[in-house]
Image: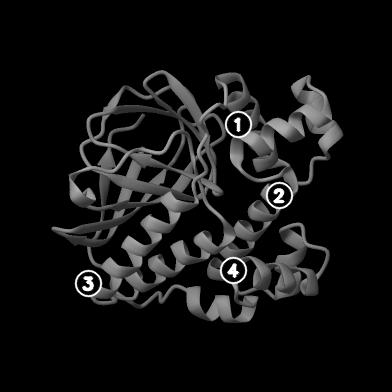
Amino acid sequence: MLTSRLLLDTPGLNIAEVRCTGQHAQWSPPEPITAFAIVLPRRGVFHRRVAGVQGLVDPATGYVEMPGTEQEIAHPAGGDLCTTITLPIPDGHVPAPAGPVHVSPWLSAAHRLLITQASSGADVVKLTDLATELVAAVLTATPSLHGSTRAHRRLADETRQILAGEPNCPLPELAHRLAVSPWHLSRVFHQTTGVTLRQFRIRLRTTAALDLLVTESRSLAMIAADTGFTDQAHLTRTLRAQTGQPPGRLRALLKTVNKAQPHGTTSPAADSE
């Protein structure tokens, strides 16, 4: 079942938190897409299929919804929490990127800043600017996947699905479980996603740390231990390098203002899948 919490709803911009319980692992009925939107996951992993092409969605990989298409969703690994940013199509047309939308730690931090600002009741002009800049940055950062075969994309998706649950799984073990050689897996993953396996692991750890900075009040040392960093200093160095800000500053920027009243309310978004 899906529920949606509207953070902002204006004629030119809609920002919503969409939560799915993920009770059903099978494909949902085809869902028509009627608006241009960027969907950025914050937690969870699920599969998405458009025009027969299947892809994996995780906190480091979002996607574009293009009007005139249909999508199917499956949740074999539980629920998820996503942000949907719906905007008018600039100049009447935006080409859909081929394949997934790759989200860097910097973009992940910008995504969470937008959520914080919207939850805190920031004015529409500021939110529109933040959302438009985020969407532009996401689309610009998405590498061209021209030339990547369906088999390569499937191998990269299977790798990401394993890493979603086991981010520290060694490359030899990954390759063994996927029945390929380590060098082939490393090459295909880099070619298909635009980042190396090492860089992708950093993205997963950084995204998880950002989430805990917002939702937890535990010490940085505990967060570092829970997200796979060597220690607090390693966490601090990585977050500063990946987002431009140290964890203390990020926590101050991204901490949700619980008493703030968001634009909109929680309501059912769709029937159970």
| Label 1, label 3: how far apart the Cα atoms are | 37 Å
Which residue is the site of mark 1? 157
Q: CA distance from mark 4 to mark 3?
A: 25 Å
Residue 16, above or below 29? below
Q: Is residue 163 left or right of residue 33?
A: right
> Label 4 amino acid?
Thr
Q: Earlier in the sequence, mark 2 or mark 4?
A: 2
CB of mark 1 within 8 Å of CB of mark 3?
Answer: no
Query: Does dot 1 land on a helix, a strand or a loop?
Result: helix
Q: Which residue is mark 2?
A: 201
Split into 4 quadrants, where in the image is the N terminus?
A: top left
Q: Nearer the viewer, residue 68 or 27?
A: 68
Tell me the tag on residue 124: 3
For disc 4, the marked residue is 243
The residue type indicated by label 3 comes to Val
Q: How many angstroms separate mark 2 from mark 4 (CA)?
A: 15 Å
| Label 1 vs 3, first from the N-terminus | 3
